[in-house]
Image: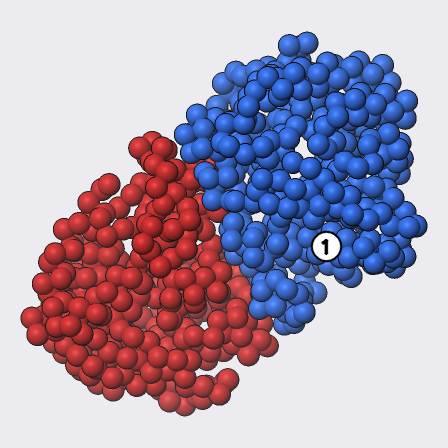
Chain colours: A red, B blue
Amino acid sequence: MHFDLIKTDPCSSARAGILHTDHGDIETPIFMPVGTVGSVKAVHQRELRNEINAQIILGNTYHLYLRPGTEILAAASGLHKFMGWERPILTDSGGFQVFSLAENRKLSEQGCTFKSHIDGSKHIFTPEGVVDIQRMIGSDIMMALDECPPGESPYDYARKSMELTHRWMDRCFQRYLETEPLYGYNQALFPIVQGCKYPELRRISAEHAASKDAVGYAIGGLAVGEPTEIMYQMIEIVNTILPVERPRYLMGVGTPANLLEAIERGVDMFDCVMPTRNGRNGMLFTWNGTVNIKNKKWEHCFEPIDSESSSEVDRVYTYAYLHHLIKSEEILGLQIASIHNLHFYLEVVKTARQHILAGDYAKWKSLVLPHLSVRL
Amino acid sequence: MHFDLIKTDPCSSARAGILHTDHGDIETPIFMPVGTVGSVKAVHQRELRNEINAQIILGNTYHLYLRPGTEILAAASGLHKFMGWERPILTDSGGFQVFSLAENRKLSEQGCTFKSHIDGSKHIFTPEGVVDIQRMIGSDIMMALDECPPGESPYDYARKSMELTHRWMDRCFQRYLETEPLYGYNQALFPIVQGCKYPELRRISAEHAASKDAVGYAIGGLAVGEPTEIMYQMIEIVNTILPVERPRYLMGVGTPANLLEAIERGVDMFDCVMPTRNGRNGMLFTWNGTVNIKNKKWEHCFEPIDSESSSEVDRVYTYAYLHHLIKSEEILGLQIASIHNLHFYLEVVKTARQHILAGDYAKWKSLVLPHLSVRL
């Protein structure tokens, strides 16, 4: 697996590249739909492929480990075959989900013990274990185990947490180097930069991560409660240290505006549950702003969601119909909103890429950005 | 709208025909997926068209009247345009749903008052009103208002109920003849035969319905608790009286085996929530029997649901994957199971039609029937 940096915007740090994987090329910047437990909620694999144009999707190690479990995934020869998805897959390390279990988890040097949210059974995630699990899942891009402290963590806690993350990172890479892929294609391991909102810690963490000479790097622990401006500052700091010729993945971010700002600061990869989760709650993202489809104003709007969209759902279903479906709690409403939003997110990164290649990204961004957060 | 009876099986009453509507032809025998409130649950319209091969779908007047309501449907120029479905639509009269509201409804000569299951608001369905509502919905086939008594109703109640249904039928037809379609295409009105499990009442009711010289006829009040054999007997009685050259629609039935038995007895049209509702509960219908996909035996079955199916979901998703999705309560599981079952139901009626046309329906039916109810 390797990354070709094709072009950098002359007026910003925005970059266009191609990440080559054994399951196909990924044109960056890219957004990765979240397929938590082996399915992007309410979306068929063929819709991801043909309508949303997803080039890579994300799976959650925590969820996949619990269900269907590594034994089933290994018997299926990995998640790609299990779910019928032949393009790349990235998995997180499970750390983020485990740490959000709050009282049901306990941290130690060795790793993190936790109780399953499904049946209360006890488990442990160690740095070595999550590499083994991701080998069995067979993701193209695996993540190192990290601790993700709250956005408002005090400095001392943030530093200790970061140091633990670094020791875990070292152990993950050691395990990674000692083991082989199980299904005949290559798997990369991305280290995760932590350090909370503290520039000094972010620098130290980026340097520790960079020392791994990885195929790509993740920036974690952002969009977890800190002000957005702090997030952007941290990205800038980290991206001055991470190697220029490798992809940078900003974990769990964000709104379309967040994506454009982070792309401008040199981020190449994103994932977020927002398009699907907010979609299921009736929120649509568009170039003109966000739509709360439950709002009565859409009840009589018999216009297609977007008559010029390349997504069929945008062309054939109307605002009024989607309003009705979401108000009536019809499953089809969740399906339409999820496809619309994911298609839009992929359009955002695709259009961003076109402007990076054309050399006018910064100008284009400043034109579209003000519209994105308008409430329609 | 008219029906061409093309062929009758030499060894049974099974018939193949074509019902011509302004929204296209319907090849009978046919199964109609239920699109309760303007959506076949968990299924896109394009999937109904291209994958399931639905030739007509059903809408529920009660649900559509409450949500989105006739005002919205009229503003959209009818349900076809509102939901983006250009093939035929049949609507029930709302009677069945209203009568299932139990304490929340009250019957009188005039009609039926009821409380909305959504907000408790009070409404009345009269014979004239449900014709007007179905005019606004714009269904190709409308149903007369009927009372649908429980399967075990005593004779006296069944007779009185039937007589009320007949008076309502007369009023429905009067209103039908006094009014015009609203959207430029023809709408038919089908009377509904009632009479519970009593042969004498079924005969009287079939004669009353037949006197309407309608485009087609419905058989209601079956599969509501009576033994299956009684249902088949009632169908036989009714179908000796209903005009041979008109389609007969058996309402709310049933299992694949029920369909084949009823087809053998001269029924042409069916609807039922079973393929979608049972699908959402993890039950799959196949030519070899029924599958409870939640059963642990499917956990390791990495075979496609049906590698030779014309439905893509059957070819790309495995039993193990669907087991996982349904166990994990993933929406995609509901989508896959719904498409699979509807596709199968349409395959059943299509294959039945081929055998009627080939003249060997009865023989074919006796070969496939024993397998359909096997629990795999």
Query: What residue lies at 58% left-to-right and 75% top-to-bottom?
Result: A76
Compared to residue A169, the image places residue B356 above or below, namely: above
Compared to residue A352, the image places residue A227 above or below, namely: above
Compared to residue A130, the image places residue B340 above or below, namely: above
Give the residue number, with chain letter if any, for mark 1: B350
Quarter occupied by residue B57: top right
Judge left or right: residue A244 versus residue B301: left
Q: Chain of mark 1?
A: B
Query: What residue lies at 22% left-to-right and 42% top-to-bottom?
Result: A375
Compared to residue A15, the image places residue B151 above or below, namely: above
Residue B312 is situated, as x and y percent measured from the top left of the image, at: 58, 64
Judge left or right: residue B125 versus residue B215: left
Q: Could you tell me how many numbered marks the image carries?
A: 1
Q: Quadrant of the C terminus of chain B?
A: bottom right
**B30 or B63: nearer the viewer:** B30
**A180 or B67: nearer the viewer:** B67
Could one spot residue B299 in this view of the protein? no
**Identity of the amino acid at label 1?**
Lys
Judge left or right: residue B242 versus residue A343: right
Query: What residue lies at 86% left-to-right and 38% top-to-bottom?
Result: B232
Could one spot residue A211 in this view of the protein? yes
Residue A300 is situated, as x and y percent measured from the top left of the image, at: 36, 33
Residue A276 is situated, as x and y percent measured from the top left of the image, at: 38, 54
Query: What residue lies at 14% left-to-right and 77% top-to-bottom?
Result: A8
Residue B261 is situated, as x and y percent measured from the top left of the image, at: 84, 46
Q: Secondary structure at mark 1?
A: helix
Q: Quadrant of the N terminus of chain B?
A: top right
**B244 or A288: nearer the viewer:** B244
